[in-house]
Amino acid sequence: MIRISTIFVAICMVLVAASLGLVLYSVAGISGPQSAIVALTALTFLILYNAVSMRLRDRSDVSGQIADLSRGTADLARQVAEFGRRLALVEGRVVSANSANADRVQSVAGEIAELGVLVQQLALSVAAHDDLLSSAAPAPSVMNDPPNHQQTQLPFVAEAAENPGAPVAEPAAPSAADAAAPRSNAQILAAVKSAIEASRIDIYLQPMVTLPQRKVRFYEAVTRLRDDKDEILTPDDFIGTAEAAGLMGRIDHMVMLRCVQVLRRLMVRNKEVGIFCNVAAATLSNPATFAQCLDFLEANRALAASFVLEFKLSTFRNLGPSETEHLAALAQRGYRFSIDHVTDLRIEPRELADRGVRFIKVPASLLLDQRQTSASDIHPSDLSDLLGRFGIDLVAERIEGERSVVDLLDYDVRFGQGFLFAAPRPLRPETASATGAPDKAQVPNAAARPASDALRADPPRSSGNAALARRAVGPG
């Protein structure tokens, strides 16, 4: 359809050509045919000029439209790329969520398998107690006083009778002083293998309190093994043999599983509580074993703020390339580290803080030793302030007297740990798995009771047999 402006321009060109021919005819005296030829020639030139100008204008318009189209295409390409990036991000999150769910399922499956083993142990323990009851022959003195016989010989049966739903407490294991003879390495290795296969790995909890309030802030998990005779093996007894046999990785993995279970149940009542879990140097240096532990810790990454991994100071001083890489992998996942077995105060806080260390445990005797003033680069009273500048908390451990607490307060020590507050208490695996959370008798409350009263925490309503049963368990 012809536009109105085009028609107007054509009319104007015809008028201009006609006017030119008329002026030539009337003014210049040119004949009519010649004036008409001149007018037609002028009209032709005007038409050509208009056509060329319109073509140039259309070309510029088309160029502008092409430029606009190019800009729109570029914007569309950027939007498509942004949508693709967002889609890839969503797919990555979905994949990571699926993998996390798979890890959680595997963790739950492992806990269920562990629970089955613990239930079997509980059934065997109950059967052994039943056999012991059935085989016990009543003596004349016992016939005269049967309640005393139950209290002195089998105190754990009384608690089971009063609380049918409660787990049966096992009698205290014989101490190392009662052992007939020291064990050989072969016997210790056999006991360690048997304990691992039968899952006879016990967790003892010792509280770490704030000073001077003495409020429980953390618990340290101490590992004990039980052989087939239920005799206790302390870390000093089995760590060397287990490391030589390459079994510390399995022990640490099982201890991590137990510690995570305990931490979850403790956090139901107190979100600010945390657990220190000891990790051996052999576990950190073994790639295969560390990969299993790292997978488990990755699945429980939500507990990283309350789950502290503890290493010896000698481990940090002898780190190799693989150990350094493994520590970096743990720190990248949000886990914090603690250092114990400190034998001197030559500490580099900046280097330790860069590696993820947030706690350093120093024996109270070492801090209060006046000889350390000349042997170290810093006075012990200034150590807490120096570590605090790098985000590291100083923990005084092995505190056994009130005088030590008073002296440590002058050193601005924030946390304390030792027998003065509470001894390590056993956390029976059947209780930790069968119940929702460890009871107060198993998790000592150092803030409310001294160590001497920790064994009598939360006695049952009825006195007598159950109270004696709880005392018979003891810290081991």
Image: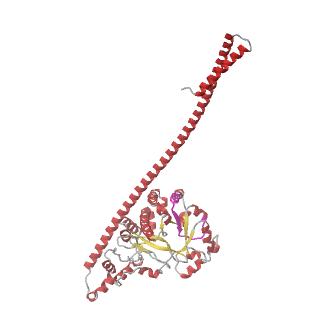
Image point 46% across, 77% down: which residue? 445
- Depth check: give the residue in front, 209 or 180: 209
Q: Position of residue 356 (x, y in %)?
A: 55, 62
Q: Is residue 297 magenta?
A: no
Q: Position of residue 449 (x, y in %)?
A: 47, 80
Q: How is the image coloured?
A: secondary structure
Residue 350 drawn above or below residue 155: above
- Depth check: give the residue in front, 456 or 22: 22
Q: Is residue 405 visible?
A: yes
Q: Position of residue 163 (x, y in %)?
A: 32, 77
Q: Position of residue 209 (x, y in %)?
A: 51, 75
Q: Which residues are magenta?
A: 326-349
Relative side of 310 to 232, left or right? right
- Depth check: give the residue in front, 471 or 192: 471
Q: State the residue lying farthest toward the right.
A: 28
Q: Is residue 341 magenta?
A: yes
Q: Is residue 49 visible?
A: no
Relative side of 428 to 396, left or right? left
Relative side of 337 to 473, left or right? right
The part of the image, by quadrant, that contains residue 126 is bottom left
Q: State the residue lying farthest toward the front.
A: 26
The part of the image, by quadrant, that contains residue 184 is bottom left
| Quarter placement of the C terminus | bottom left
Image point 62% across, 76% down: which residue? 371
- Count of numbered circles in the view: 0
- Depth check: give the residue in front, 336 or 398: 336
Relative side of 189 to 418, left or right? left
Residue 396 drawn above or below residue 280: below
